[in-house]
Amino acid sequence: MIYPELFISFKRVIKIGILVAGICSFNQKVCAQSESSIWNLKMKEVIKSTATKQPLVTGGSLTTSAAIFGTSMVIMAFEVSAKKERGNSKKKYLDSLIKNLRSSVDTLMHFADQDIKVFNRFLASMKLPRNTEAEKRHRDSIYYEALKEATVLPVNIAKSINQVLWATQAGSSICSSQIISDLGLGSLILKSSLNGILLIAQGNIQLLKKDDKYFFDKERKMLLMESETSERKIKEAVKTSMKIQEY
């Protein structure tokens, strides 16, 4: 004999099992995506993973990626310029800048991946239990370390972008006039990226304790000043080469 109640319960068990399996599969996919490299994703996947209420790609990672594209524009401009020089001291200098810039690209690519991992650790720290005093102390300690990590990384990213901006201005005066507009474009992308990553850092700095807040805010302001000096010199070189008043 088949009892209707048991049959209904059995159907519910099956439905629950399917639902749980689906949730586990989804969570595994999310974890895999968040822990894998952003550079393994196609451009459409990056956009789709960002433009959502539950993004898998962070703003810091995207901003760092933009800086990499800007750096690539500068490398291209220096490569073309170096080819025109053919063996003189200018070519050797441009080649040395290109080598340093390619190293900066590798560093920034690593940072773009790290930002996603750091952000995930920060989110995880906020979800730790706080039911007892011991749990609260543990949670607060882990949270603050994650917050500091989420502040240190964008500051380090900004330092790397500043190194790229310095190299850009160092070679801007010998960049070919035929390609210098691309160097100017790259520098604009870089400066915007630096402003963006420091804005992210500033949001975290506001949550830090007094001494840490003072230290990191001082770093942020110094990085902004350095970037503005490089930007000004690059603009002068571009305007002189292109014979234009402003851009």
Image (cartoon, rainbow, N blue to C red):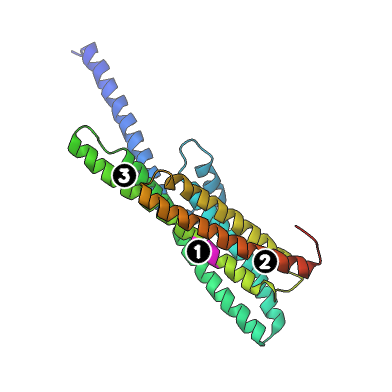
Image point 20% across, 12% down: which residue?
A: 3
Which quadrant: the C terminus? bottom right
Which residue is label 1 attached to? 160
Badge 2 amino acid: Ile
Instruction: Identify the disc placed on residue 143.
Output: 3
**Which segment is the magenta one?**
159-163
Q: Residues within 10 Å of mark 2 (few under 14, many from 20)?
A: many
Query: Could you say which quadrant of the image residue 15 lies in?
Result: top left
Residue 25, above or below 242: above
User: How far is mark 1 from mark 3, CA to CA?
Assistant: 26 Å
What residue is drawn where x is 76% and y is 70%? 178
- Tell me which numbered mark, 1 or 3, is placed earlier along the sequence: 3
Nearer the observer: mark 2 or 1; the answer is: 2
Mark 2 and mark 1: Cα distance apart in space: 17 Å
Query: Along the line of sight, which residue is nearer the eye, 18 or 234?
Result: 234
Q: Position of residue 127 (x, y in %)?
A: 31, 37
At mark 2, the secondary structure is helix
Q: Is residue 84 left or right of residue 225?
A: right
